[in-house]
Amino acid sequence: MKLFPSGLTQKIAWPKRPAKLIATLGIQILIFIAVLFAFERWLLSTNERAGLSAAQLAPIVAQLAPEELERFKAGEPLLVYIWATWCSVCSISSANVSDYGRDYLSTTVAVQSGSDREIQDFISRKGYDFVAYNDREGRWFKSMGASVTPTYLWINYPGEILYLSRGYTSSVGLIGRRLLLTDQNTD
């Protein structure tokens, strides 16, 4: 078998111990994840915490069912997912938020994505399991100082932003950040 233009042939050497290679790679990935979470925790502890005004919080709280509002008031963090129908990254991450919302408090804000009916049709067509506050003209989005979709805010009941993230986040990433917040709130 010719692998090189000069006519040299070389046999591909597979590792003699693939299990050891896989274990080493797994350990390196776990170390990377641990360092990433440690860095995020450090960021959480050093960031000045901004908050939502009563006017910014009102449309978000209005979407919660009575039992969800009670959990929120009792101290459970709420994920506010800011997205748009025209956002290509949102088309990937929205399913993760939908899954997250089955077990944890969450709500969404659809930015400049059409009428209430168009947004609801979009959510139904995609099979998402969440409701969306329609920020039709992007005023709420701009009032938050946001500039990117998707954006994820974890907030507490008074409206303090506990954590902010932008861009794609996996289901594991959403749950990991939620666990970081739970751990932080018990310190």
Image: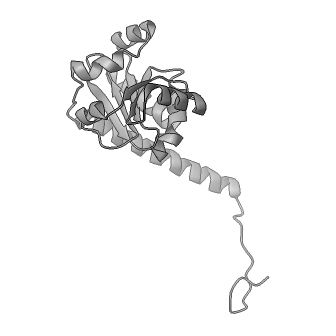
Q: How many marks?
A: 0
The image quadrant that residue 67 belongs to is top left
Task: Give left or right: position of 138 versus 96.
Answer: left
Question: In this rendering, would 20 be left or right of 130?
Answer: right
Q: Is residue 48 visible?
A: yes
Q: Is residue 127 visible?
A: no
Image quadrant where residue 115 sits = top left
Residue 20 location in percent, x, y? 65, 54
- Classify residue 56 as left or right of residue 109: left
> In the picture shown, does residue 63 fall above or below 172?
above
- Residue depicted at 28% across the width and 28% down the height: 161
Image point 36% across, 38% down: which residue? 165
Quadrant the C terminus occupies: top left
Q: Quick one: which residue is furthest to the right in this view?
A: 1
46, 18: nearer the viewer: 46
Q: Position of residue 153 (x, y in %)?
A: 35, 31
Quadrant (top left/top right/bottom left/bottom right) for the N terminus: bottom right
- 176 vs 54, nearest the viewer: 54
Q: Nearer the viewer, residue 179 or 140?
A: 140
Q: Which residue is drawn at 46% across and 48% down?
A: 32
| Extreme-bottom residue of the structure | 6
Way the structure is coloured: one colour
Above or below for 136 versus 22: above
